[in-house]
Image (spheres, rainbow, N blue to C red):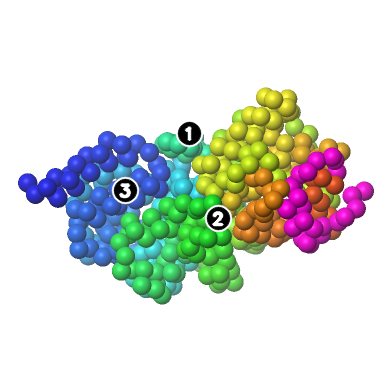
Amino acid sequence: MDWHLRLLLSLLVVFAAEATTTKHMKDFIRAVESIEAVNPGLQMLDVVKGLRKAAGFETELIKRYLGDLSDAHDLVANPSVTSYVREVINHSLSESGKEKGVVLTLDGSNVALAPMLLGLEAGLQSTVQGLYPLTLTHNLVASFLHHVHNEQTTVPFGTKGFWDSISSPKVYTLSDLPSLATDTLIIGGIDGFILGSEISTSNHRERSLSDLLKSYYSQQPDAAGLDASPRLISQKRRMNFKKLVSFSLLKSQMVQALTVRRNLNESERKRLDDVMNEGFDQFVHVYAVCPNIITRSQWGAAAFIGSPSYLSLPVPYLFIHHTYQPSKPCTTFDQCASDMRSMQHYHQQTNGWSDIGYSFVAGSDGNLYEGRGWNWVGAHTYGYNSKGYGVSFIGDYTSTLPIKSAMDMVRYDFTSCAVNGGRLSSSYSLYGHRQATSTDCPGNAFYREIQTWERYQSYLP
């Protein structure tokens, strides 16, 4: 047997033994690599359609825009690889809240593979008119319709969840009432829309599928964080999505789809209009205005000790902090999530607090991490905890500044998200932690910087 073939077969055996038990994007990419290795000469479109055929993933909507699978290749693959592909591509949601067809990515986001691959296939076929319905429109419309008939047991869209293990993800469970357009389906749809849009107008189609997915999902920022990273990476999906999408076109397609499917009575029709309009505005708010917020369950938070007190919203103040310890900025989800758990443990076990003190924490990985969040009173700024949010930046900024993308995330995205969401007063005032108590926080260099930010006030009443 040729030694190249023996090597490929040994790689397939290793994949079957190790990767098929976890639901991580890097494992899916390894599966794609193994398939490409034993199916040489195929173009990216051939592999994408072959994966869909192997997964048995075909609907009338898909056939309308992408055609049937009669010309799709039967990919040669180890049976365990084929089984894994079928499992991670086909999306489903159980009554117990277990969501399948989802993978965890290195940037901490959870991606449903089906809409991502459909968007990519639409771009490869230059079927740009199919991008919106295949990635976002259909799922959002179905979710809004379902919610109208099940308002007590569902939410309109965007239900998030958590993994049984961040390091070895196997089971993903929803953390709230279900929706037919979960957060994973929307994130997968956004990624499919971005990749499909990009590949339809560029030379990316000459690459292999595994290479494209690795460059998008496996980018590991260095010490400079996202500021020095390429443009087309998952950590920058919100920026790319806002540049590429036409929200007016997306909404008009949704209205048209709802009109066609509107076999409802008058009261149901009016309620559907309200749900669609409110839901669409909220969709734009969450996925285009707000930063990507990693929830407590996603970074592995311990439970709050006792019972939290609640803020009276909107709050009038925003306080900026640095963590000082950890002193090194975190540039990956794994590192930032670990820092969050470490700080929470210190605040609870050493300081004797009920929870991590900050409302939110900014990483240098493109994510904002939920601490006590929007509603709970924090322990960040003595005398003002019930009057404002405390947002901290991971790192020591005595003599250096956080990376620009992290500062912009809080300065612009977080404040817009908080004000538009009715959580931070539209006339809020911004302060450094040191203005409220005797401390060097948020560091000399960073404090000089925030004095140039909008809404900074020198006087704290």
Residue 280: image x %, image y %? 62, 61
User: Left or right: where does residue 187 sit relative to residue 80?
Assistant: right
Residue visible at 40% across and 58% down?
215
Residue visible at 81% across and 54% down?
430
Give the numbered dot on residue 96. none
Quarter of the rendering containing residue 129? bottom left
Tell me the kind of residue under disc 3: Arg
User: Left or right: where does residue 357 sit relative to residue 316?
Assistant: left
Task: Nearest to the eye among marks 2 and 1: give it.
Answer: 2
Location of residue 100 with respect to 350 vertically, above or below: below
Tell me the kind of residue under disc 2: Ala
Extent of the magenta region:
436-461
Location of residue 152 with respect to 224 vertically, above or below: above
Residue visible at 19% across and 42% down?
10
Q: Earlier in the sequence, mark 2 or mark 3?
A: 3
Residue 360: image x %, image y %? 68, 45
Q: Which residue is mark 3?
A: 30
Q: Earlier in the sequence, mark 2 or mark 1?
A: 1
Give the numbered dot on residue 224. 2
Does the rendering let one see residue 353? yes
- The answer to if 442 sits in the magenta stretch is yes
User: Left or right: where does residue 392 sit relative to residue 123?
Assistant: right
Q: CA distance from mark 2 to mark 1?
A: 31 Å
Tell me the kind of residue under disc 1: Asp
Residue 206: image x %, image y %? 30, 69
Density class for disc 2 (Cα within 10 Å; few <14, some 14-19, many ≥20) is some
